Image (tube, rainbow, N blue to C red):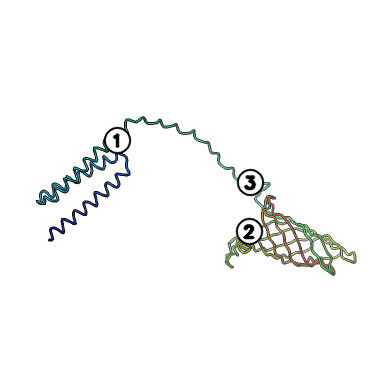
């Protein structure tokens, strides 16, 4: 009983191996099938010798039948290979000439090649009981070397600084003027664009001081504001801001709602 079970196990294994070889050969060219058939015949011959020495004539007959079947298939594959070899082979077209690829030119570092980011803006500030003024200013924009944005869980480049000069021009209801040149320093926090559906927004604060003024001395003023920015095709980010604050001088100030539009320019 054990001998019969062992024979059945070996037979199933041999049939599985043969089926695998044939399945692989079916997807190959006739020449590849012939090569696989020769390798399989060597395997069958080794097994025939082995089981003949063991005296297992039933297994020897089974293996000999597989060998005869394989030889018959190989005759068909040989004829197919010879027929395929007699067909004319189309000449291989010459490869296309190589295309010269020019390296992309490095982007220019600004209008003058300085790599300095600047901003220029125009706005209005004023309210009831205060001198209303037109504002014009320009600033240098700097990155944050301390990467403070990371402290509050934002990208490291979220914080920017501005240092600039501005000009105010205006009169109040009593015809008092508030004309001055002032220096300003801003700190800006750029917010993640995904917070506003892909729109870049920011908040900021400014400290300013008139250095050239009419009639009387100046004093420290400031602004708080929020804005949005984006590239509208002018060569950099355009922006608009709304805030509240003041540019002060002794006895008279221009203060109230602050509205600005501006443009970043890389020099």
Foreground: disc 1 or disc 2: 1
Q: Closest to the observer: 128 or 136?
A: 128
What mark, if any, has residue 81 been given in the picture?
Answer: 1
Say left or right for 145 vs 163. left
From the image, tell me which residue sits under label 3. Answer: 108
**Disc 1, disc 2: CB below 8 Å?**
no
**Alpha-carbon neighbours of circle 3 within 10 Å: few (<14), some, or many (≥20)?**
few
In primary-sequence order, the first of circles 2 and 3 is 3
Q: CA distance from mark 2 to mark 3?
A: 19 Å
**Disc 2, disc 3: CB below 8 Å?**
no
The image shows residue 225 at horizontal and vertical percentages of: 71, 65
Specify whether residue 106 is in view: yes
What mark, if any, has residue 143 been given in the picture?
Answer: 2
Q: Secondary structure at mark 3?
A: loop
- At 37% from the left and 31% from the top, the residue drawn is 89
- At 72% from the left and 57% from the top, the residue drawn is 139
- The picture quadrant where one finds residue 169 is bottom right
- The picture quadrant where one finds residue 193 is bottom right
Q: Secondary structure at mark 1?
A: helix
Say left or right for 65 vs 138. left
The image shows residue 116 at horizontal and vertical percentages of: 66, 52
**Alpha-carbon neighbours of circle 2 within 10 Å: few (<14), some, or many (≥20)?**
some
């Amino acid at each position: 009983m054990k001998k019969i079970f062992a024979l059945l196990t070996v037979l199933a294994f041999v049939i599985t191996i043969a089926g695998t070889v044939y399945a692989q050969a079916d997807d190959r060219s006739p020449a590849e099938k012939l090569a696989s058939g020769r390798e399989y015949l060597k395997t069958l011959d080794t097994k025939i010798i082995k089981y003949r020495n063991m005296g297992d004539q039933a297994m020897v007959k089974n293996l000999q039948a597989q060998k005869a079947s394989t030889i018959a298939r190989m005759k068909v594959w040989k004829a197919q290979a010879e027929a395929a070899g007699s067909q004319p082979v189309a000449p291989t077209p010459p490869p296309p000439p190589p295309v010269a690829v020019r390296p992309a030119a490095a982007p220019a570092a600004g209008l003058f090649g300085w790599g300095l980011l600047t901003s220029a803006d125009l706005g209005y500030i004023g309210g009831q009981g205060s001198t209303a003024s037109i504002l014009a200013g320009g600033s240098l924009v700097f990155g944050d070397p301390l990467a403070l944005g990371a402290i509050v869980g934002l990208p490291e480049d979220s914080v920017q600084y501005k240092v600039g000069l501005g000009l105010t021009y205006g009169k109040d209801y009593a015809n008092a003027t508030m004309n001055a040149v002032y220096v300003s320093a801003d700190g800006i926090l750029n917010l993640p664009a995904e917070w506003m559906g892909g729109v870049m927004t920011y908040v900021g604060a400014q400290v300013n001081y008139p250095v050239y003024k009419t009639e009387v001395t100046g004093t420290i003023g400031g602004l708080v504001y929020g804005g949005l920015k984006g590239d509208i095709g002018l060569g950099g980010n355009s922006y608009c801001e709304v805030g509240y604050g003041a540019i002060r001088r002794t006895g008279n100030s221009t203060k109230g709602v602050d509205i600005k539009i501006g443009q970043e320019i890389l020099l």
